[in-house]
Image (tube, rainbow, N blue to C red):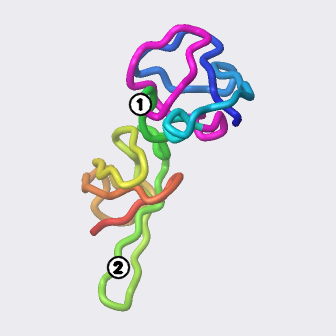
């Protein structure tokens, strides 16, 4: 099984980049296999706890992958009956899929510039208003 190991010391809150992890092939028990995480799934995830270089990373070591970062331009959609309205907004905080965060209406929108609202992240650079 392909497992991910810390290539460097990782601190709680660090956002994982490709150079920070290395892949190793090893045999895992069924319990350990369920806890393991693929190296490709780690990039852009945030560390939940501090680990030393060489530590095998598991699901309990990392948080959800960050899909939207503070300051990113986000396409926000809202369904009203049979209509779908879309506008561009600026994320005011980092978020993973399913998290609801504050957005700032983009300056290139025609009305209500500078107003904030809440939206739920659905993918990279995308959100919906419920």
> Residue 3 placed where, x, y %?
65, 30
Q: Residue at x 53, y 52 (%)?
A: 124
How crowded pointer 1 is (Cα within 10 Å; few <14, some 14-19, many 20+) is rated as few
> What numbered label is drawn on residue 123?
none
Question: Where the N terminus falls, by quadrant?
Answer: top right
Q: Secondary structure at mark 2?
A: strand
User: In the image, is residue 42 part of the stretch drawn in magenta?
Assistant: yes
Q: Is residue 71 visible?
A: no
Q: Horizontally, is 23 left or right of 52 in the view?
A: right
Q: Quadrant of residue 117?
A: bottom left
**Is residue 81 in view?**
yes
**Residue 20 position (above or below residue 129):** above
Residue 123 lies in the magenta stretch: no
Residue appearing at x 31%, y 66% in the figure: 129
Q: Position of residue 42 (x, y in %)?
A: 58, 34
Q: How would you rate the neighbour count of disc 2 (Cα within 10 Å): few for under 14, some for 14-19, many for 20 or more?
A: few
Q: Where, by quadrant of the figure, is residue 111 drawn?
A: bottom left
Q: Which residues are magenta?
A: 38-60
96 displayed left or right of 118: right
**Residues at circles 2 and 1 in contact by the CB criterion of under 8 Å:** no
Circle 2 is placed at which residue position? 79
The residue lying furthest to the bottom in this view is 82
> Which tag is nearer the camera, tag 2 or tag 1?
1
Mark on residue 60?
Answer: 1
Question: Percent x, y for residue 26?
Answer: 71, 27
Residue at 27 percent of width and 69 percent of height: 130
Please state the horizontal and vertical placement of residue 25, each as a whole percent of the image. Answer: 74, 28
**Residue 36 vertical placement versus 75 (above, below):** above
């Amino acid at each position: 099984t392909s497992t991910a190991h810390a290539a460097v010391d990782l601190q709680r809150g660090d956002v994982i980049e490709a150079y920070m992890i290395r892949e190793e092939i090893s045999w895992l028990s069924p319990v350990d296999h369920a806890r393991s995480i693929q190296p490709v799934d780690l990039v852009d995830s945030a560390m939940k706890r501090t680990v030393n270089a060489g530590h095998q990373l598991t699901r309990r070591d990392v948080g959800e992958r960050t899909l939207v970062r503070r300051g990113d331009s986000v396409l926000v959609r809202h369904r009203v009956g049979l209509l779908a309205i879309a506008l561009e907004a600026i994320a005011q905080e980092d978020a993973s899929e399913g998290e609801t965060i504050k957005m700032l209406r983009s300056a290139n929108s025609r009305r209500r510039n500078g107003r904030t609202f809440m939206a739920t992240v659905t993918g990279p650079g995308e959100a919906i208003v419920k």
